Amino acid sequence: MSLYKGYEAVIGLEVHVELKTETKIFCSCKTKAKEPNTAVCPVCMGMPGALPVLNKKAFEYALKAALALECEINECSSFDRKNYFYPDLPKGYQITQFYHPLATGGKVRINTENGEKNIGIKQIHLEEDAGKLVHDGNEFTLIDNNRAGVPLIEIVSNPEISSAKEALSYLKNLKNILVCTGVSDCRMNEGELRCDVNISVHKPGEKNGTRTEIKNLNSFQFAAKAIEYEYKRQADLLENGEEVVMETRRFDEAGGKTLPMRSKEQANDYRYFPEPNLPCICVDKDAIERIRKSLPELPDKRKKRYVDVFGLSEYESECMVSDCETAEYFEKCASMSKYPKIAANLIIGEILKLKADGNGEIPVCPSALAEVCDLSGDDKINSPTAKKLVKLLAGETFDVESYVIKNNLLQINDKDIILNAARNALLKNPKAKNDYLGGKQNALKVVVGAIMAETNGRANPVIANEAAKSVLEE
Amino acid sequence: MNELVNLSISELRTLLDKNEISPRMLAQAFLRRIKEKDEDIGAFITVCGEKALDLADKNDDCHGKSMLCGIPYALKDNICTKGIKTTCSSKMLENFVPCYDATAKRILDEKNAVLLGKLNMDEFGMGNSTENSIFGATKNPLNREFVPGGSSGGCAAAVAAGFVPFALGSDTGGSVRQPAAFCSVVGMKPSYGAVSRYGLVGFAPSLEQIGPITKTVYDNAVVFSEIAAYDKKDAVSKSVNYDVISGIKKGIKGVKIAVPKEFDASTDKVIEENILSAARMFEQLGAEIEFVSLPSYKDALNAYYILSSAEASSELARFDGVRYGYSSDENEDYEKRYKNTRTKGFGDEVKRRILLGTYVLREGYYDEYYKKALSARIRITNEYKEILGKYDLVLLPVAPALPHKIGEKRDVLKAYSDDVYTVIANITGFPAISVNCGQSRDGLAVGMQLMGKAFDEALVYRAAYCYEQAREGGK
């Protein structure tokens, strides 16, 4: 990995994840509502005399996440108050876990240029979300308390990330694992996953530099860009003999740079002390085991299984496990087809595009794809036809085999027919032979193309290629 | 009808059950008395009047229902009542009308008791004289020149003056027991976790409990047994057998009572004498008295003030004028708005405690103050646990001095140190009752405190009942 002006970056990420529970963490309000200030009650509105009561499901979800990330679970953890004043904080304090978090010491595996690397997790703790401030464009700021009290887990990584690329890999893998467990959908654009960056730079061998914090990042891409920019900014400062100021910055998306945040949002003495209204939560080893057993197969394990059982390559397997839906879709297809590898390739080549265009939904049902794979694997259709079929299946459902026959799409494997077509191709393109003998490889493509045209795209590509070569070399 | 207001809950129950009076008649009798006499006392902030009579009519048929059916009562104005102003005697909540009931209120509704109104208090429960109220001071019915104690002064005065047969107050550092002693009525602070705190606008969550104030010990036991229950809305409330009535008349033969060998230096001779006299009475009634050295009074007091102020600084942070309550007009930015709202909305004592609490929680000082106070709390609790392992009850004064005159200037720290005997039951979480044990100059009363093991209210009531019966020749 190349260093910018010789400086190493030391990056840690604090990721907040909204848990997908029905109700909030300390009251029975719903976590989702349409109209502002409708999913509220005396507890999450901080009304006088209201008391928090822990939502056990939220705790279970947090445990699940911690186990999926290979953390050590603290048998007893407790809640603390983080005190500060802000209009989106109804009680004037946030209930969080400062002194005794629910889990410590996990890891996320990432891929780097030099192979796999583990990014350690310092701790995971449970806390409540604040409300949302909405600026109405005029003089007022509006407060929506629907989000106040939604359960969050905060995942604090060790400062072991060295670049924007590594950070991106960490975020993608972290998201993938959490979505797989079902505890959150982690959609950053919906605020279900939020990322703060801590970054400092130093020359190798020297001690760590002053770090800055970057908050309010709205996408993985912006997080990566912000890290890139800040890394260079800090290195440039130090190269110029200037100092890095410890401060909180935000990312200006339009300008592509980080800027200091207004100082008011920075210095705060939170006066943490134990939350007296909530007893300690203790969880016994049996409960931990029960939840560990309920975890679905996680991406890393899945990837290995696809390589071992289905014979996929590392790359193909990696693509299949890039998210839970794709993985489940692939497995369904693989279970219904003789050619999982073809399924994987069609998914990579066609399905993932369709999925991205169609808002994450896969428009081709697994059984149809499996049919296409089998026809392709049995050499009954060629790969351009397979791709065309998949695209068609996105628009309508039909019986694949019948369609192929009805529309005359069966692959032509007859060498004589293809040789004939090759000869015809040469007649239509007399220059091709001389071009080919003169070293122009393009001539081969022209002849193959003509064979395809004559056979309505049905010629077996391998045979077509051989036939083209043979007539050109005659 | 004048007599009705002097009767105990048990006596009123008998009359109601015999249909000699109706709940409406009862409510009317008390409302009349309030109308006639409360101007002199100043116990009530809000009187419910019409609502009360409607409620009384609804509960007309009490057969087979609870002991409290048709019985009028009032609530300290920091207990939330749906649709009825709940002010905490503060400008901050002067016009605040909750849209929810405290659990204790909901329970009393289910038991068909009749709410007559909300009672004056020290602002947000901070104080021990009921002089820190935007509505003015409440007067002690025994001698109106003197304070009724606090912060549940309105409750104690209302019961003592015959305005209601019972009231519910809240006790964070003595705020039910001390005014009860000052007004010569009975006040109980239950074990921490016995009565739900949901809807109590408290200031120190780890220390406070709602507690009943009544004329007699038996009445107090009845009210307690009705309101003590596990509540799923209060995560620290406990599910325990709260029957304190069955054994209340058993007497105290063989019960071991620890009496302080030394009193705190600030204690009036009069108080000491009355406590020792009470100890002798207990002995005559068959209890075993032993003089015991108790853990440091000063440590308990200091731990209490650090912890309760720290909690208060956080608990009262929600009062910012954004969602409810008083809000200053200066709206330039949220910081200015918050500052002005809180400066104008809170009284001096409240501000003092918030500042103190903020100070002790500061970064870098947590160990020096808060953590130390926590350790002291644990140590003192263990020491009292040990004592209550050897003895059944601890006898203590309620306050080290008699009530002062309303408006009399007091040193702030001296006022705090008047809580020296009552904070013990709050920091340990043990139950403690205050019962009258003597008369003094100016018509004022002296109370004594009995503290028991956690959730051993039954024995506390038994001993208090036995004592009360012996002193007053049975009621």
Image: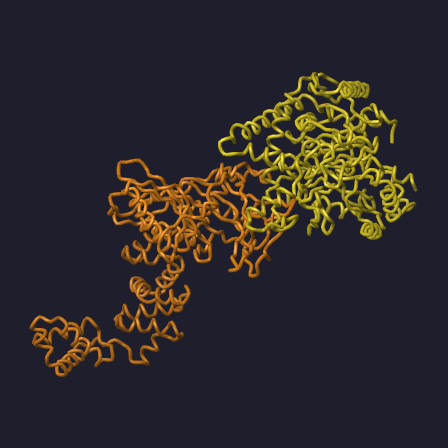
Q: Position of residue B46 (x, y in %)?
A: 78, 46
Quadrant containing the C terminus of chain A in the rendered view: bottom left
Q: How is the image coloured?
A: by chain
Compared across the picture, whether B152 is left or right of A327 comes to right
Q: What is the letter of the yellow chain?
A: B
Residue drawn at (70%, 50%), measured in percent from left and top? B97
Is residue B93 shown to the viewer in this render? Answer: yes
Is residue A292 shown to the viewer in this render? Answer: no
Compared across the picture, whether B206 is left or right of A147 comes to right
- State the residue in front, A282 or B114: B114
- State the residue in front, A270 or B394: A270
Q: Where is residue A344 in the image (x, y as percent from the top left)?
A: 31, 62
Compared across the picture, whether A73 is left or right of B448 comes to left
What color was chain A assigned in the picture?
orange
Residue drawn at (51%, 47%), measured in percent from left and top? A60
How many numbered discs?
A: 0
Q: Position of residue A13 (x, y in %)?
A: 39, 46
